[in-house]
Amino acid sequence: MKNYDVIFIGSGHANWHAAVTLKQAGKSVAMIEKDQIAGTCTNYGCDPKILLDGPFELLAQLKQYNGIGVTDNTAINWTELMAYKHKAIDPLPLQMTALFNQLGIDIVMGAAKLIDTNTVAVNEQKLTAKNIVIGTGQRPAKLNIPGREFLHDSRDFLDLETMPQKITFIGAGIISLEFATIAVELGSTVEIIEFADHALSSFDQYHVAKLVAKLEAAGVKFHFNEAAAQVIAKGDHFEISTTNNLQIKTDYVIDATGRIPNIENIGLEEIAIQTTRGGIVVDDHLRTSVNNIYASGDVIDKQIPRLTPTATFESNYIAQQLLGNDTAINYPAIPSVVFSLPRLAQIGVTTREAEASDKYHTQVVPYGKQLLFQYKNEVDAELTLILDQDNYLVGANIYGNDAPDLINLITMIIDGHLSATALDQMIFAFPSSSIGVISLISTLLHRD
């Protein structure tokens, strides 16, 4: 039986950042992984998604110049793009394994199960540690309907060698809208079934409505207030029936109805670690109900966004906890992005919260029109700012292709509690596009 200072269950962002920090601090560390080293984001999520999205983003920008100097004659070859994805993404777990080995982190491949509060069983061996960190993440949910065996998930989509001619998404969340953007551009017939009467419930609905309208104009068909009831295979295609008797003929069905935490079969019940449907319950130090066992990343039962940067933040926090810093976790403002085209982004106080309180007021900034050539003729790009009673920025929503980079700038303004005077003391690159938005924001902020 081998003993360690810390054992990590899972090797994704929720764990490996802490593992590296602790090993560099002289701790003995083991990481147990039953799938691919470096986890979902690296292998089946964020990294391949943004790689495949790249050409579509460029094509969208080119289209904004149609009629003013650019003739749209560009096509995307999905098969070649997928081959490039494999070339770039497939080596990543091997590269990460080599890094961990070089640092001296022990990697154990297999399914882990907690035997007691200090012992983990894997591959018929037992490992012990003073502390254990659970970072097993989430997996795609799967509807319990007849024909569920025909349902695919996001991992499958990101590995498609050819794009189906007809593709149907169940659920109108982030995954569906991002992937629908790609599929419809490639000429597929795309339909989205959604139980609610709107898409992307956690995002600003004014901007969501604009995105839905743009996708509809591109050919995506939304079926709101519908629930998938069954999927039947008929020859070379499938038929989806809904509870309202809608019938959809399709070649490929993706269940994008959410994700669920990986908390089964890892021994949580045996040692009385508290869980809910949302994941593992933790305190404000990310400790589970067993004090020497921590949880990190998407497997935690939490209300804040389950994102890779959040998991990384938690991983770094746990490393400092185990090195003696006993302060409670304090999350900064967390930006969220939908990588559709155009992008949506938001952070901090939402427009819904602002409208329900007299503590805030909102300001719409149509920066696409005000900074027309700087933002590549994206005339409908806009920003909604939420300010408090002292005119400090506390939240924002963005509709536009540059939303991911702009939300990062806004994150620093919010977290730094920056005033207009503070921004005036900084010099930004000119004539970059972002300096124009910073100037527009500055005119609205409190001035010291």
Image: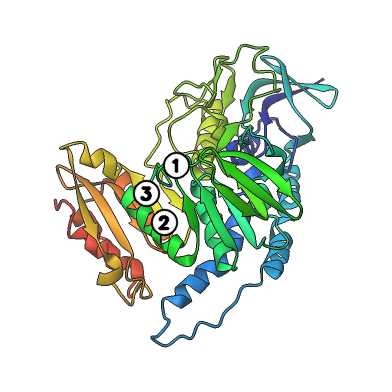
- As displayed, is residue 333 above or below residue 112? below
- As displayed, is residue 47 above or below residue 170? below
Q: Please tell me whether mark 3 sits on a helix, a strand or a loop.
A: strand
Residue for badge 1: 225
Image coords of residue 328 (percent x, y): 42, 25
Residue for badge 2: 212
> Would residue 157 appear left or right of 395 to someone viewing this image?
right
**Residue 154 is at least partly visible in this image:** no
**Disc 3/disc 1 C-alpha distance (Å):** 25 Å
Q: Looking at the rendering, which quadrant does residue 389 occupy?
A: top left
Q: Could you say which is closer to the camera, residue 391 or residue 80? A: 80
Q: Nearer the viewer, mark 3 or mark 1?
A: 1
Residue type at mark 1? Asn
Q: Are marks 3 and 1 in contact (CB under 8 Å)?
A: no
Name the colouring of the figure: rainbow
Farthest bottom residue in view:
69
First reached walking from the N terminus: tag 2 or tag 3 = 2
Q: Looking at the rendering, which quadrant does residue 225 occupy?
A: top left
**Disc 2/disc 1 C-alpha distance (Å):** 15 Å
